[in-house]
Image: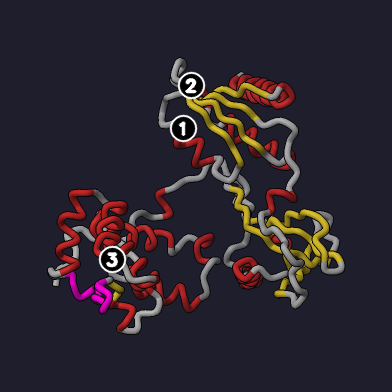
Amino acid sequence: MELFEEIYGSYFQAVRRVLMDAKRTPLTQKELEEEIRNASSLESSLVILPKLLAGAWSPLLLREETGCFSCALDREGTADMEGFLKLPLTKLQKSWIKALLPDPRFRIFFSEEALATLTKALEDIPALYDLADFHYFDRYTDGDPYEDPLYRECFQTALKAMAGHKPLLVAYESRKGTPLTREVLPCRFQYSPKDDKFRILSVSLSHGRPKQFHVLNMARIRGCHISKTPVPKNFDWDVSRFQSQAREPVQIRIYHERNALERCMLRFAHYEKQTTYEPKSDTWLCSIYYDPADETELLIELLSFGPVIRILGPEAFLLEVRRRVKRQHELFYSYVE
């Protein structure tokens, strides 16, 4: 039986919404019509509703004695409706995942068993691209050792602690090579494309209480395991409130050239920012809030955009921009000569 003409279209979304709501509580015919209209359109409801009530899709709903309709799939033992009605992957999505499989950064998020399952499931799918198609000219070459078994083990332990909101006991090596032991609440990962390194944004625990914000480089973790220390009551896992922030945000003007807005939004997605459009100049003004520790990296990223953006302030940041540009100019002409 053909259920939907377009599984990724409004029909599927409308029926999915109806079934999810009908599982929670039976719906009247009027409520069904309203749900379909809200999920798609008035015209769609005129097509979908008859099919659900008495047409080819009617087995999806069960008419109660009260005249209301409940989800028939639930009566057949389908407990996980969210998973059951999940959209299948398209060929393009499968091809994209197949292209990611050889990427060592992708692989550290999965166990060997999960990777083997993925590889087998996608063996007949062509990869969307090849990693050899990309050349990184603005990235350091001493990135994290993604293939190291210890690194993979520590990464997945930290990932499990984050997912379960559990404390993590970490054996860590400082920049000077000093061994340290810390008990932390790992809030989220941070990846630096420039350094090709992962960091853990965390809050240390002292006598069971949150103490201080820490950034742990994954490559310096020599061992870790999930701690049995209870998480402090009402702990806010939003790590942003523990992070320091520069007094003033960096303000930039983004011009309507070379897809600059989309590129900026992607490049600075991990920063808090505010963006407004100026119709008169046909440009966008963007304020980027950042941790002072990330200032150098942010400056380099902004300079990489060239003339499609203009850095407006603050003054201290502009002085550093001018200093770096002047230095690059001097190095370039000294090389030419």
Q: Residue 21 appears at what percent x and percent y? A: 36, 66
The Cα–Cα distance between marks 1 and 3, rounded to whole angstroms, is 46 Å
Q: How is the image coloured?
A: secondary structure
Element on which disc 1 rests? helix
Residue 116 appears anywhere in the view: yes
- Contact? badges 1 and 3 (CB < 8 Å): no
Q: In the rendered structure, which segment of residues is drawn in magenta?
A: 57-67
| Residue 6 in the figure: left or right of residue 308 | left
Against 202, residue 208 (above or below) is below
Q: Which residue is mark 3?
A: 28
> In the depicted view, which residue is nearer to us: 64 or 232?
64
Nearer-N-terminus badge (2/1): 1
Nearer-N-terminus badge (2/3): 3
Quadrant in the rendering for residue 25: bottom left
Residue 12 appears anywhere in the view: no
Q: Residue 131 appears at what percent x and percent y? A: 43, 54
Q: Which residue is mark 2?
A: 278
The Cα–Cα distance between marks 2 and 3, rounded to whole angstroms, is 48 Å
The residue lying furthest to the top in this view is 280
Q: Mark 1 or 3, which is nearer the eye? A: 3
Element on which disc 3 rests? loop
